[in-house]
Amino acid sequence: MEQQRGLVRVEVSPKRVRAFLAGEVVADSRATRLVWEKPQYPTFYFPLADVRAELVPAGVTERSPSRGDGQRFDVKVARATAPAAALRYPDSPLENLRDLVRLDWAAMDEWMEEDEPVIVHPRDPYTRVDVLASSRHVRIEIDGVTVADSHQPRILFETNLPPRYYLPLTDLQLDLLTSSATQTQCPYKGTATYWDLTVGERTYADAVWTYRSPLPESQKIIGLACFYNEKVDLYLDGELQERPRTHFS
């Protein structure tokens, strides 16, 4: 719908942003645009002049109700080609997008803000992660069984998500946990590893996670364990908390 145009926010990032393919610089910009194609986080768009790779027309057009007709390009460097991995809107109704190029995140081998890697997706400058030490009593029940009980949680507050209670491993029923092969990544916290949790005859896959080597801004949760509030009975200072409704529910 054409009225959706006004919902696309575009800002200039103050950070130097680079994208790499096969060890070569695809784009290097100090004027990268943050474009909110979706509400959860922005997407990087580069000024055309800051794209170093060759862009070869892929003969593919995409239609966006807010951005107009997008033209796909193969991204070609000396040692590799990423098919249809670049997108331009040269005739966009949004004038400030016309001279920009979007590179598909997964098609690039590495992304950097300044000299540090960025994982999963660009970080939203309006998302904040605070980790606070607390003496509140946190007790976790599953199927009526207490699986964790702690008076020393670290509470992680992340914009637009419910508080997460990270607990020392010694405050969990470790005999109920079995290592899982699952790993996930967060652009603000790093790589999480998981445990399955068995209560009675039922096993809950990937019910507990930890960050063994979190990113610098989340070091306070290193080695601590967390449960999805959405999936357990969480008692805070003896009071059962309502389960939040999120995409993890």
Image: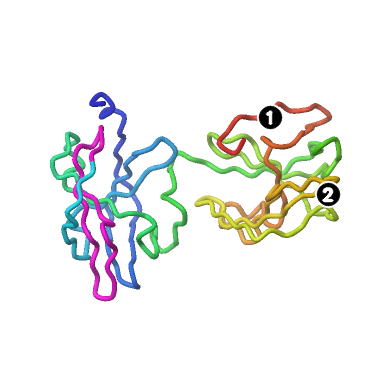
> Which amino acid does the dot numbered 1 rest on?
Arg
Q: Residue at x 33, y 47 (%)?
A: 13
Decide if residue 27 is on the left or right side of residue 191. Answer: left
Q: Nearer the viewer, mark 2 or mark 1?
A: 1
Q: How crowded is the residue under tag 2: few (<14 C-alpha within 10 Å), some, or many (20+)? A: some
* Sequence-first tag of 2 and 1: 2
Q: In terms of image quadrants, where is residue 248? A: top right
Q: Is residue 167 magenta?
A: no
Q: Is 49 left or right of 127, judged from the image as shown?
A: left
Q: Residue at x 62, y 61 (%)?
A: 213
Which quadrant: the C terminus?
A: top right
Q: Nearer the viewer, residue 177 or 153?
A: 177
Q: Which residue is mark 2?
A: 171
Residue sitting at the far left: 91
Q: Is residue 22 above or below residue 91?
A: below
Kindly report the secondary structure that dominates the magenta region of the rendered protein: strand
Question: Disc 1 designates what residue?
Answer: 243
Kindly state the secondary structure of the residue where label 1 is placed: loop
